[in-house]
């Protein structure tokens, strides 16, 4: 009789551990993707960013399809979204600059215009 009780408890314990693990693995794909982007995206082209954004959207859709995410999991997803957005903003600058050069936008003129706009805004606030 003790063997059966021990076997039932052991089976229940394994089942609980497996279900907990599967919940965290639902977010692991997104986490791994964001980590890979953070490591590898410094020289991404516009096309690579488009593919990365599409994959990121697919991973979020998959996660959003789960009805039973815990508050901790939701916080982790929000944190990963922030990390991804920061990485895109930080590393996509090169692709943006390349597109601007292709479009014939002079970077010197652009920077001058930004400086002038900031100066005008400061003057308006001082008045």
Image (cartoon, rainbow, N blue to C red):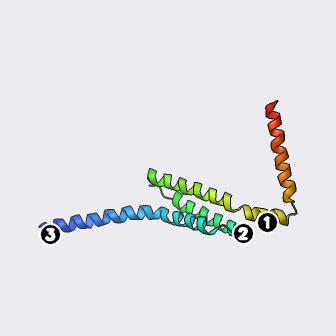
Q: Is residue 39 left or right of residue 18?
A: right
Which structural element holds mark 2? loop
Specify the farthest residue to the top: 127
3 vs 1, front mark: 1
Quadrant of residue 93 within the rendered picture = bottom right
Residue 40's mark? none
Q: Residues within 10 Å of mark 3 (few under 14, many from 20)?
A: few
Mark 2 or mark 1: name the one nearer the start of the chain.
2
Q: Are marks 2 and 1 in contact (CB under 8 Å)?
A: yes
Q: Which residue is mark 3?
A: 3
For marks 3 and 1, the one nearer the N-term is 3
For disc 2, the marked residue is 45
65 or 48, which is in the foreground?
Answer: 48
SS category of the residue bearing label 1: helix
Considering only vertical position in the picture, is 19 above or below 120?
below
Image side of residue 112 versus residue 44, left or right: right
Q: Quadrant of residue 42?
A: bottom right
Please give the name of the residue rendered at 54% of the width and 54% of the height, measured from the top-left corner: 79
Q: Are marks 3 and 2 in contact (CB under 8 Å)?
A: no
Q: CA distance from mark 2 to mark 1?
A: 9 Å
Query: Residue at the location (21% across, 66% down)?
Result: 8
The mark closer to the camera, 3 or 2, is: 2
Q: Position of residue 86 (x, y in %)?
A: 63, 56
Q: Residues within 10 Å of mark 2 (few under 14, many from 20)?
A: some
Quarter of the picture containing the N terminus is bottom left
Residue receiving disc 1? 98
Q: Position of residue 103 (x, y in %)?
A: 86, 63
Q: Are marks 3 and 1 in contact (CB under 8 Å)?
A: no
**Pointer 3 or 2: first along the chain:** 3
**Residue 44 appears in which quarter of the rendering?**
bottom right
Where residue 80 appears, as percent x and y from the top left, is: 55, 57
């Amino acid at each position: 009789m003790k063997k059966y009780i021990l076997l039932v408890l052991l089976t229940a314990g394994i089942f609980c551990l497996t279900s907990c693990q599967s919940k965290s693995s639902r977010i692991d794909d997104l986490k791994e993707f964001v980590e890979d982007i953070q490591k590898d995206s410094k020289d991404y082209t516009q096309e690579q960013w488009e593919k990365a954004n599409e994959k990121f959207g697919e991973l979020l859709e998959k996660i959003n399809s789960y009805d039973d995410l815990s508050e901790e999991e939701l916080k982790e997803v929000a944190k990963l979204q922030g990390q991804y957005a920061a990485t895109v903003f930080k590393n996509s600058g090169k692709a943006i600059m390349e597109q601007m050069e292709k479009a014939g936008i002079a970077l010197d003129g652009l920077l001058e215009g930004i400086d002038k706009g900031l100066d005008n805004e400061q003057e308006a606030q001082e008045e």
